[in-house]
Image (cartoon, grey):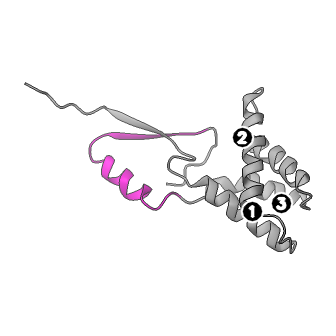
Amino acid sequence: MLIHTLPKAITFDCYGTLIDWEAEIQRYFAQKLAEHNITDINARALQGYWEEVQFQSIQGPYLPYRQVLRETMKLAFDYFHVPYAETDVEEFANAMGRWRPFPDTRDAIVALQRYVKVVFTSKYQYFPM
């Protein structure tokens, strides 16, 4: 006889799995490019380079993720010669808590919660569910 059992809990890494961080980063970068009337740099290319730099950064010694965001934004913008102010850097580092989930995330989590405990994990401190 086959017995179906459910786990007591399911864990999800929040960003990239539930939160559409790539689209949100591209949106933020596109906004900054537009503010400076920069049309010869694609926000997707800027985001792609940022992702490479960010991945290298998180392979090194531990840093709080807000610090990773600050440093890697500066590196990416410097690489593409995109001007920025320190307020832009802080805005980017603090924006992650406001990024939107994928369209089906909320409904899926609500449905799962009827059967199991749902746990979110992240290196970041906000869980905007």
Q: Position of residue 125 (x, y in %)?
A: 63, 44
| Count of numbered marks | 3
- Magenta segment range? 101-122
The residue at the point 83 percent across, 55 percent down is 89
Amino acid type, callout 1: Ala
Q: Is residue 86 above or below residue 17?
A: below
Q: Which mark is residue 43?
A: 1
Earlier sequence position, callout 3 versus callout 2: 2
Q: Is residue 74 left or right of residue 95?
A: right
Q: Nearer the viewer, residue 106 or 80?
A: 80
Q: Amino acid at mark 2?
A: Tyr
The residue that appears at 56% across and 60% down in the rendered structure is: 100
Measuring from the top left, give residue 92's x and y in whole percent: 76, 56
Q: Does the CB distance between marks 3 and 2 fall below 8 Å?
A: no
Q: Which of the two residues, 102 or 9, is positioned nearer the viewer here?
A: 102
Q: Is residue 95 magenta?
A: no
Q: Image check: 6 left or right of 92?
A: left
Which of disc 2 and disc 1 is earlier in sequence? 1
- Give neighbour class at mark 3: few <14, some 14-19, many 20+ (Cα, 10 Å): some
The mark found on residue 88 in the picture is 3
As measured in the structure, the alpha-carbon distance from the residue carrying label 1 to the one carrying label 3 is: 16 Å
For label 2, the crowd category at 10 Å Cα-Cα, with few meaning under 14, some 14 to 19 and many 20 or more, is: some
Q: Position of residue 120 (x, y in %)?
A: 49, 41
